[in-house]
Structures are given as C-alpha cells and as structure tokens.
Amino acid sequence: MSKIERNMSLAGQAPAALSATQRIASAIGLIGLFILVLALANVNFPNKTLFLSLSLILMTAGTVIFANDLYRGKHAGIKNDGIWFKSMTGRGLWAWITGIALTLFYIVLYWFPEFLGLTENGPNTGVISLFDPLSYLINGGPASQWFVYGTLYTLAIFIFGYKFILKYRNNRYEVLRTFSVMFFQLGFAFLIPEILIRLNQPYFNPANIWPLNYDLFAGYKVDEFLSAGNIGVFMLAFGLISIFVITPILTYKYGKRWYCSWVCGCGGLAETAGDPYRHLSDKSLFAWKVERWVIHSVLVFVTVMTIAVVYSFLGENAGDFWLTRDVFLWGAAGFLTLLFAAIMIFKRNELAKDAKYGAIGYLVIILSIIGINYFSGNGNIFFFPGYQLREWYGFLIGAAFSGVIGVGFYPIFGNRVWCRFGCPMAAILGMQQRLFSKFRITTNGGQCISCGNCSTYCEMGIDVRAYAQKGENIVRSSCVGCGICSAVCPRGVLKLENDSPKGRINSEEVLLGNDVDLLDLINQKSR
Amino acid sequence: MEHIVIIGNGIAGITCARHIRKNSDKRITVISAESDYFFSRTALMYVYMGHMKWEHLKPYEDWFWEKNRIELKKAWVEKIDFQQKRLYFSSEETMSYDKLVLAIGSVYNRFGWEGQDLKGVQGLVSKQDLELLEENTQNCKRAVIIGGGLIGVELAEMLKTRNIEVSFLIREKAFWQNVLPMQDAKVISAHVRSHGVDLRQETQLDKITGDDNGRVKSVITGAGEEIECQLVGLCAGVRPNIELLKDSALETEKGILVNEYLQTNINDVYAIGDCVQLREAKPNRNSIEAVWYTGRMMGETLAQSLTGNLRKYNPGNWFNSAKFFDIEYQTYGKVSADPPEGEVHFNWQHKDNTKAITIAFNASDNKFLGINTFGIRMRHEVFDRWLDEKKSINYVLQNLKEASFDPEFYDSYEKQIFRSFKENIEQV
C-alpha cells in the first residue's frame, strides 16, 4: 500500500463521539443487560417478574432513546455519516468485543445450556429461571434456553427495527418491510409456536420453511405431527405446500425478497440488529465464487440428509402405508432428475459454465450414492444412517454456521453471512429468482456515476455497481431485495421491480446518452 | 503492435482503455500520477464523510487491469514530444507511443484572488485535494466556501458531518442559479440553509487574509465583511487542465481543441473528457462539458474510432444528475436558467419543500423541451425517447407515470402535477 493510501485510511476524526443523550441511553440499555448478566451469575432475584420486566424495559428504553437522539429532529435521508470511522461499525475494538461476546453466547446456548441455568430435573436457575414467569404466562411451562433466546431475539428485532424505521423513515419500502418482519417474528416465530405448546400441540412455526427448518421432516417431528391428529396433518401438509407451491409462486411474482427480507426470522434479525454492519460484506469476485460453492453444497447436504431421514422413517411394506421406502426414494430421485432436466433444457443459456458443471456433478454424485447404497442393501442410502446425518447437519450447519458464525460474526463479516453462504432456503429461492422470476433491479439508463454506495451497502456482497455502471439490470440469485442499494444511490439509478420476465437480463453494454449508431455497432459485433 | 498511450486514469481515459481492449488486441498503457488505480472521483466526498473507504471507490478490483492487459503506469508527464511521439516523465524515464489520448481532466478555478495561495485554501478535485482537506480540517471550526456549484454544495455537506460551521458565498441570487431556473434554485437554497449552512447569496470574495504562519485567517467579502475561518474552499468551477500543453504545437483555447472525431490538430493525438473543448458545440450543448457522463461517452466513442469503427462524437439528449444534501436532482433535455422568448416553464412544488419539478416547453407548438426533477426519480430511457419523438407537454404530463422511477410504495404525484398544470394553463 502506498503512503498516500495509508494516509487515507487514517482519514477523519469522525464525529464519532456519542452525544450526552446517547451516552445516557447506552447506560440505561446496559443496565438492562446487566440484570441478565447478574442472573447468569446466579444472582437469585427476589421478584423475577419485576426484574425481568425491568431488564427488558430498560433495554428497550435505552435503544429507543438512543435511536431518537440519533435520527429524530434531523432531516430524513441517508444516515451513514462516520460509519467506517466508528469502532463498533468499522471493525474496531468494540466490534471485536461484541463479536466475541455474541459468539460465546451462541456456543453456550447451543452446547452448554446448563451454564444459562437449564436444569434437567428440577427448577431452572440462572438467567433461564428469570424468564420462567414470562414462559408460564405464554406457554404454561418453565422456560428453556430456546424460550430465553426466542424472547431476546424477538425483542432485538423490535427495538432495532424501531431504530431502522427511524433511520429509513423517508423510504416507505423499508418501513413496510420492517413492520412485516416484526409481525412474522412476533406472531409466527414466537407466539404461535409457544401457544401451540400450551394447547398441547406440536411446536410449529409456519414461517420457518424446509430446508431452513431442516427438522420439519425428521422422524420424531413427523411422528409428533401424525399423533396430533388433523391439526398435525395440516401442519405437515402446510410444510409441504410451503416449499413446493407457495414458495415458487411468490418467488416468481416478487423474487426471493418476499421471504428473505419480509418474512424470515434470520433475515429479520439481519435487517434490524444487523443493519449497522451491512457494509462489512466481502464484495470480491473470489468471495462470490466461494459463496456459490458453499451455499449449494449446504443445499445438497440438507437434501441428502432429509431424503435419508425420511427413508429410514418409512416402512418397507406397501400394505401399511402407500408411501414405502422404495416409492419415496425413486420418487425423490425422479423429481430431482426431472427438475434438473427441465432447467438444462429450458434455461441452459442462462447458466454459467461452472454452474452447469456444478449442477451435473452434484446430480451424478447424489444419484450414484443412492444407487450404490440401495443395491448394496446396507439399509442406508448415504452410507450413514439418516439420524447421524441429521445430527451432523444440526451441529455443523444448524448451530455452528447459522448461529455462531451467522450472528456472532455480524460486526466482523457483516449481517448476512449465513443468508449468503449457508442458507439452503436462500439457495432454492435464489435459483428460482435467477431463472424463474419477474423480479430484478432496474438500472436507470446512463445515470450511474460508479460511486459505489450501492456495492458498499449491499449486505449480500453483490457488486451492484459493476452492473449499474454498464447499464445492466441486476438479476442475481443472492439478492434478498432489501432495497438499500436503491435507497443509498445518490443519483436515483436503481429500482427494485417486478416486471415481465422478457428482457429482464440485458447484458449488452449500451449506456444511454451516447448516440453512436448503436444498432450498427451491435450488428457488427454479432458478425 | 500498435501502442496506444492514454494520459489520465479518470472515467474518460479508463472507459476508452476498456473499450479498446474489448474491440482489439492493441497494447494499451494508462498513465496517471494521481492514483495507482482508477477510482470514482464523484465519490471522493463519501470517503471524507465515512460512508466508504478508499477501496470502495475503485470500480474494478486490482487484478482486473493485468487480466485485461491494460498496463498502468504511475508517473507524471512533464513534456510531450509530438514529433518523435515520445513522453518525458518527471522521473526522467521516457515512453514512446503510436497513438496518444489526452484525458487529463480539469483543475479548479483560481481567479487571482489575494491570499489564494495561503495554507488552508484549496479546491476539491483530486485525490490529493481530499488528503489535503483531511489535513486542513484537523482543527477547523469554521470554513468559507466560494462559488455555488456542485462541488461547493458537496463540500458543505462534507464539512457539516465534521461539525464545521460553513459559510457559503455565492454570486447568484440563489444556489446554482446560473444553471437552474430561479424557482428551482430557491428550493435548493432553502434546503441547504435548513442544514445549517450560512448561505450568502450575491456575495463575492474580495480577498483572503492570512496569519503570520501563512495560514488562512479570514475572508473579506465584496461588501467588506470579514468572516473568520480556518479553511477556504475554492469551488468556483473547474477548467480544462492544459498547463502541460502550454507553448506546444497542440492547439488549445480554453481546452484542448478537438473536432467531432475527438482528434486534435496533431495526427494520432486525441483528447477526451474534461480537458476537451469541441471546435463546434452540438446544438443545445456547450463546447466544454466537465461532467462524468460526457467523459464516459467520449471514451466509448474514441475507442470505437481507434479500433477501426470511425465514429463521430454524438452525445444524444442532455442529461445530468446530482444530490444536494438530501434532495436528488435529475435533468433531461434543456431547461434554461433564464428562459429565452418562446420557452415556457411549468413548475410544481410539493408542500414539504423536498420535491419539485420544472418542465420546459415551446410556447408556439407545446413541444416538450426538458425537465428538472427534485426529490423524484425519473426514467432516463423514457425521457430520452420522448425527447427524440418530440412529444408535447400534454403528452408528457399525461404519461408521467410511465417515467416514474421512485421506489415501490412511494406516493406518486403525477395526478397532482397534472392538475396543477391544468390550473396554471387556465390562469394564463
């Protein structure tokens, strides 16, 4: 790096200092958090309801006061001043402290819930016991680590959602989208499942669709659904319809954003609590290559795992139930092959070379593994028993990837690491978005000035500018349609749209404004 | 192999280099003393404001250039020998060329004010200017900006993010009124003021005074008022950067004179971008246009000519854009600041003072001439077509929705605008 560039990175004594109000607000919020820490350290609060309420109210109040001071009374508009100068949002010391604290929290949450006070046989202690009153109120039982997590998660989406709404209050798309994720988080992800438990029904979050919800078709879950009678069957059916019917239709009409930034809980947290970190995503071409291999590998993993799990759940005898192991296995193989063939026949021109090779490779591997195991008669179809694959998936992907790396590393790698590199649901929706959808981000003629705000603030690491400066529309499978590129563009170049699929992908580098004889040029090129 | 050397790695030079590579295998060298790699000059402000880091300003990753065999040379050209076709660098190296493209940009105006060389007095055009600004604002409480153009308002916005008080001296009656019609200029003036900028219209700079260390101390206005400050921003426009070519055989006037093929008076020497002065301006356009888009279009055009498809530089309908603090501005076609006889303006403003449009049309045949929009995004493609097809003002207003480019769920104002126009017409 040259001397000049080193100077540049020192640029700026930021207006980074917090105002007096912001300091007080931070203190209030931290006191709320401190109550949880005390509880974690096994301080036994006399009146749990009071102290839990106090903690949640203080955290809420702190965030609300902070956000009000930061954004209220100022012009509505883009509020990114000093983002890269601040320690918390510019990968400084505070970012690392926060990242490490979050990571440790996730590790304890997933693998050592007893440290949080979870007690197998007997009353909870620690921070979990602090949440018992709320848990009894909602689901009628004592709290678990997941109840604590769910409560804090929902609270985070609400209080940081409030901050986000203030920040983007001039942009109705952002405001509505945030109300939507708040609604789905509170209703679908938090209240409905907890109330179902109170009613002695299976735990079910209708917004958590397979394969994001990788356990939906696991044996124990299917048993649970089937033993719950009609309502259980309905849940199972809804799960199937969600991925095979609802998802394709909505994604065709609106792109994957209907889920990723309007409904999904992971997306909800990323867009609210994670918003201050969106600029940290890696925009390099290399990162894009890694992304495509990793996310599609996770998709293959979850598909394989689910097939194995369902296979081992089913029986051999057609007399017991029409869906036997054989019917299911060959049905699944046939479905995957048909899907693959359809894409290759109708959409091959829209696939890059490596995408084709990757797809062919994956299909051949899956089918040959099924073949080998099936004909060897070892009872497994992927060398290992289904439950074991599920365990590994749960550990590697469900916990380590989506939780620890996905959220714990917000302040370092950005807020959508999981959604970009890991989420199999995003992979499926992305494929549909790229190949069968009306959604695109339209570039406005020749107005782009290559400033790079769009790319910088793209949480998915898409180099939006690379398309905009060529006058190309942005049709990328990873785009979650958060709309921030369009919001931060200073020249009004980008617009999220659902329009006719024809002409959606325009790859000719023809910018408006220059009247060299364009038709002539194109004709010459094709000659 | 033919060696094309481009001096200047701004948008004009780099666009030219990329398109030459697309169409040919010629050897390409791009020379710059300003930066190692191409960056977006328009985004310098965002680095100062902490929205982006320097690396984000680079539209292409660093490996791009080698992969596309575009040689980058960091050097300062001191002299050009047009006869021997050879460049002389300040490092005493030389380089020969077969074809030379001058894309050397512009420099900010200094009109010989007293005190213009004091420390703390600067413009904002280059990367070095930005670094200097960083230095100059270390302990700055108050700044004065001279000249009300696009860079001036950007500088004001930048300084406000560092809590520096800004006085903004402009010659005109309202901000950018030499380009915007009065009613538009007033909307922007009010908005700039609402951000706490001390905007002083019809105020000129008399001189800049310094302290014993040769650092700026204050500014004296034409009316004799003294404004204390630690920074003076010179933002009274830019002019072609032709210092290098003084006393050379290359013909210059205000800029490097080129014909419609962007050729200079010397064979195999071309000029594009901000440094250019067209011998014959296109109708409705200026002979010098220092904007991003013209640089890019000239680069595209010249690259065609240099690779065997001889093209005239033929920019289509004028368009431009900017952002004044929170208000985005777009323009398509021609809207005169002082409408001549026969050009009528229709103006609409939203009551919240952040949205407005002005549409110009011919009084005689109602032909649509151009539009300024503030706080409302419009589709370039649609307006470009309407201008080509010479649509009437009525057609444009009736179909304004087709041109809307605002994000989803935004309020639309087409009906309000249309109604307001009808009422206006009835009054006339």
Image: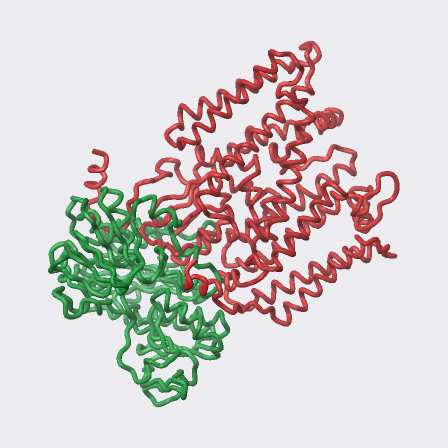
Chain colours: A red, B green
Residue nearer the viewer, B344 or B182: B182
Q: Residue visible at 30% across and 68% down? A: B180
Quadrant (top left, top right, bottom left, bottom right) of the N terminus of chain A: bottom left
Q: Is residue A172 left or right of residue A375?
A: left
Q: Quadrant of residue A193?
A: top right
Q: In which quarter of the image is residue B193?
A: bottom left
Residue B35 visible in the displayed image = yes
Residue nearer the viewer, B379 or A156: A156
Q: Residue visible at 15% across and 63% down? A: B257
Above or below — where is A226 with respect to B398?
above
Q: Give percent across and percent down for residue A522.
A: 23, 39
Above or below — where is B101 with respect to A327?
below
Q: In which quarter of the image is residue A436?
A: top left
Residue B386 visible in the displayed image = no
Q: Residue visible at 36% across and 69% down? A: B124
Quadrant (top left, top right, bottom left, bottom right) of the C terminus of chain A: top left
Q: Is residue B318 left or right of residue A49?
A: left
Q: Give percent across and percent down for residue A521.
A: 21, 41
